[in-house]
Image (cartoon, grey):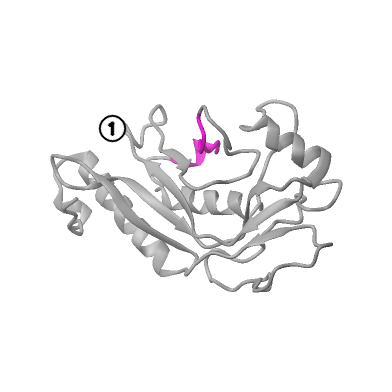
Amino acid sequence: MDFKTPKEPKSYADPRDKRLAREYFLLEELCKKTSKISFKPAELTKSSGLPYKYRIFYKVQTIVGIDANNKPIISSGPHEAEITLPPGYPAASDPPIPSMISDAWHPNIKSKNPGKGHICVNMKFISAAEGIDGLVLRIGELLQYKNYFAEDRPPYPEDPEVAKWIREIAEPQKFVAPDKPIDNSNLMDGVAVLPPVENKPEDDSPFTIINQS
């Protein structure tokens, strides 16, 4: 892929090209403000060579699965997501398509096939005046478990199996809760509230920790 940094958005004649260039610079500015998020273009348009698909990398603690005892397996990443900007974006009828490439165990992210990795987020906040930088942050907060929906009612969780585990095991045993995320650090300043995990936890720990680089 022969990627070149886009020109200023106003220099493009085509409205879609203007928007794609704008999204690149929004992501670039976002990632300058945090050590927890990075990105790279994944696919380019044939006509203008502008990115319309991105890989996003998160260095946060999240649940990537459960062990034989139904305890959460925690990983500090990096966790890889993908965001595709379809041809009609930013029209409400053609919103961004987010998905996880790496494993995630979250009620609003599909953990198994078919549809593994699909992320269910409210796209109403994406408008012609906004960008995908907000979506990138929303996905990060899902991974941190700052936001999740696990109730057995409309609009219904994306992954019923994970949602059931949340309701019947994780919340009763206080692994997670609406006011107890897995990672409470600020995505935008890199200051961790949770202490870094360097050693394997004791046998009575509620978590299994995976350290990755």
The image position of residue 171, as x and y in percent, is: 81, 46
Give residue 92's quadrant in the image: top left
User: Is residue 166 positioned above or below 159 on the image?
Assistant: below
For the point 59% across and 74% down, the residue is 191
The image position of residue 127, as x and y in percent, is: 42, 40
Can residue 133 be seen in the rendering of this structure? yes
Left or right of residue 113, residue 26 in this image: left
Which residue does the numbered mark 1 point to in the structure image?
Answer: 87
For the point 44% across and 57% down, the residue is 57
Magenta stretch prevailing secondary structure: loop
Left or right of residue 87, residue 125 in this image: right
Can residue 150 be seen in the rendering of this structure? no
Q: Nearer the viewer, residue 15 or 173?
A: 173
Local secondary structure at mark 1:
loop
The image position of residue 112, as x and y in percent, is: 57, 34
The span shown in magenta is: 115-126
Question: Is residue 175 in the magenta section?
Answer: no
The image position of residue 72, as x and y in percent, is: 71, 51
For the point 15% across and 48% down, the residue is 12
Amino acid on which disc 1 is placed: Pro
